[in-house]
Amino acid sequence: MARRATKIVATLGPASSDPALLEQMIRAGVNVVRLNFSHGKAKDHIDRAALVREAAQRAGREVAIMADLQGPKIRVGKFAEGKVLLQQGAKFVLDASRTEPGDIDGVGLDYKELPRDVKAGDLLLLNDGLIMLTVDKVLGEQVLTTVKQGGYLSNNKGINKQGGGLTAPALTAKDMEDIRTAMAFQADYVAVSFPQNATDMEMARQLCNVAGAEFRHRPGLIAKIERAEAIPNLEAILRASDGIMVARGDLAIEVGNAAVPALQKRMIRMAREHDKVVITATQMMESMIHAPVPTRAEVSDVANAVLDGTDAVMLSAETAAGNYPLETIIEMANICVEAEKAEDVKLDADFTGMNFSRIDQSIAMGALFTAHHLGCKAIVALTDSGSTPLWMSRHRIHIPIFALTPKLTTQRKMALYRNVRPLLMDQSVDRDRALGEAEEHLKRRGIMATGDIYAITCGEPMGAPGGTNMLKICRVS
């Protein structure tokens, strides 16, 4: 299999829950498995996490598990007939006090705060923007609207407000319970839906750390950027998170489809500058839910995200409910490999004007620079926390970074880092023996052969977090 730097996140669902198929998908290139907490009960997620761990073990790979929280349910209620056909120009009432099922004239709301969040003239987008309602006025708990763009509206479809402005908190009571479930199986990452600011992410981290304390586990936190309000707060959200997800679905509805491509580029660039990871998501291979091959536009979309520098590309319904989950992974992996071949390496320009106050960060940058100019076969980082490989992975280089760690949790977390191959290796020995074992480790795996030059970083004393202070250039004997 060709070497691939960009990672693949696949959503687990009915289409991919067969153990043999899941193992094939991991072998074909899945690096992170997403569990969607919008569906299923706590026990379902715990069982699925076990399924992932077992499939990964059989495949001989280590994958990360990402628990994706549902977030606030900003949705309409249910209809007596399951759905209604709204005609353009018709009147329709969204009623927070309504308890009976909806009909052609109106429907109840799961999101009871809507009447306080909107005013006359606002545009509401329902069902992923396929239906548009203009707010005429608000009467108590009722939002009176006129249908601007009609279509079928069915049970529990989502509501967005153009330009943003819905006040729903990012973390609901269900999310708090789900965080406890995710910590019970030690999810490597927790994705937070609809955060508006850094405070939402800080609160999520506190909840994760408290729930994970008994397991001595601290997950990485991913902020899903899907609200208009999150865009001006992007830098603060990044600082409070371990990474972001460019969640193009809801974001496109709030800011408009045309604004998303430029925002995607900006978010990826900003995440890399802040030493954070970034996942590009939503409809990447949408047609492969039903077709065995992607459209040319989808191929370009995935390739462009790779060229932008995303750490990972994500699949949702394609692998959760699609007809071709394995084929989708294979196609996506191939697109990533081809796109990476066209990447420019601009390390010299990257380092111009950069200042490093930390020794470990300076060593990481020195390893990249030296390996690039010497034409090393590999960069090897002995790491406890994973920080050194993370810093290295923020810069484009066509040399694989092998991160050797004694910690399983660190190995799994690094599964999301671009161009980093995390491997488990005991490092309780002295430095010289550890360096020798690292070389043997990679020789056994066929990664390096006699005569190859590689760069290796480690810390003295061994095993001290944040202690990387040595760079050595070696030739395989």
Image (cartoon, helix red, strand yellow):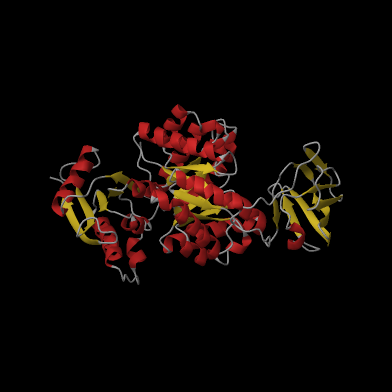
Where's the N terminus, which quadrant?
A: top left
Is residue 288 placed above or below 439 in the rendered structure? above
Up-down relation of residue 132 to residue 63 (above or below) = below
Image point (26%, 49%), residue name: 378
Q: Quadrant of the C terminus?
A: top left
Q: Residue 142 in the image: x percent, y percent?
A: 82, 56
Residue sticking out furthest to the front? 214
> How many numbered marks are there?
0
- The x and y percentages for residue 137 are 84, 61
Would residue 142 be seen by someone viewing this image from the given angle? yes
Q: Give the left or right position of residue 318, taking residue 386 as reference.
A: right
Query: Looking at the image, can residue 294 be seen?
Result: no
Residue shown at 49%/50% (left/top)? 190
Q: Where does residue 164 sit, x and y in percent of width and height?
A: 67, 61
Where is residue 57? Give x, y as percent. 36, 34
- Residue 165, picture quadrant: bottom right
